[in-house]
Image: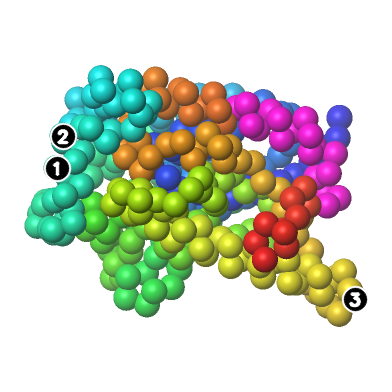
Amino acid sequence: MMIKRINLALQGGGAHGAYTWGVLDRLLEEERLEVEAISGTSAGAMNAAVFADGMGRGGRAEAKRALEAFWRNISQAAQFGPFQPTPFDRLSNGWNLDHSMAFVAFDMLTRMMSPYQLNPTNYNPLRAVLEKSVDFKRLEGCRAVKLFISASNVRTGKVRVFKSGEITPDVLLASACLPFLFQAVTIDGDPYWDGGYMGNPAIFPLIYGTATPDVVIVQVNPLGTDGVPTTASEIMNRLNEISFNSSLMREMRAIAFVTDLIDDGKLDSNQYKRVNVHWIEAEQQMRGLGASSKLNARLDFLLHLKAIGREVAERWIDHHFDAIGQRSTIDVKEMFL
């Protein structure tokens, strides 16, 4: 059996990260694929840490179990929370929370008050979920999968990539720290916000820090949109999508530029790494989900997203497995230039 190695790049997206759970769940079943490294941001960072911890503890089967347990823990922690879809939401908008009074009130408050005022104790329910789901002491010494976790330094505006051996609950919370919801997470004296602002996810660690040339990007945030946003919430949602995709698009343009130079013989392929880019996406399904659904952690919604992730991963394996190690399966220039 031919085994091919890949690197994974996992985007953030709140509860939409359950779609990535589905992708990982299917990839773990594919014994012809082996993951060398994962670069993750926000929910992608949490998926990455749970994946690596499970692989280090008991291989593929344990990684699948760990991811299942993590997302069920997320749902359990949120089941008595204020962010629940109303019956009208379920009838009119599917999985969104647009008619939830708690969500509407919270959305308005976060536009007028900072988390330092709204949440002075800096309580974050994700911390307990992470500590329940991941053995961070074991993860510190785990080398089954290399990890690269991105967070945005508030002071410098630069991305910081935390590597295997540095991953703590604070690192994952920093990678997922939306500044309108949570206070900045301080690590080594520096404050950090969500890594998506500067790398969603960062690709360069996979280029310089691994031997594998194939990078599989699991897209959560849609690149395009249907029509022009007209309501305040639609405009804000689209601005967030553009913002959180911008760093990835810049890296994709740089990869396309370097690839052309290598192919034209202007750069030495022995000194510069030629990257094969692959893309797993559910663009149409994710476009139909509003920003409010990123806070919907109901188990039925998470399982719905998982099913979408498994389906698109299955289709990607069927169509593109032979190309791994040989060539990119997307036209990077056409997509990003």
Q: Amino acid at mark 2?
A: Met
Q: Residue at x 87, y 69 (%)?
A: 263
Residue 244: x %, y % from top left:
45, 57
Regarding mark 1 in the picture, which secondary structure is present there? helix
Membership of 149 in magenta stretch: no
Check disc 1 and give the amino acid type. Answer: Ala
Can you tell which mark lies on residue 105? Answer: 1
Residue at which label 3 appears: 265
On screen, residue 240 versus residue 207, left or right, reads: left
User: Looking at the image, which is closer to me, 287 or 18?
Assistant: 287
Q: Quadrant of residue 186?
A: bottom left
Quadrant where the C terminus sits is: bottom right
Magenta highlight on residue 311: yes
Look at label 3 and name its amino acid: Gly
- Boundaries of the magenta span: 310-327
Q: x, y percentage for residue 258?
A: 75, 72
Mark 1 neighbour class, 10 Å CA radius: few under 14, some 14 to 19, many 20 or more: few
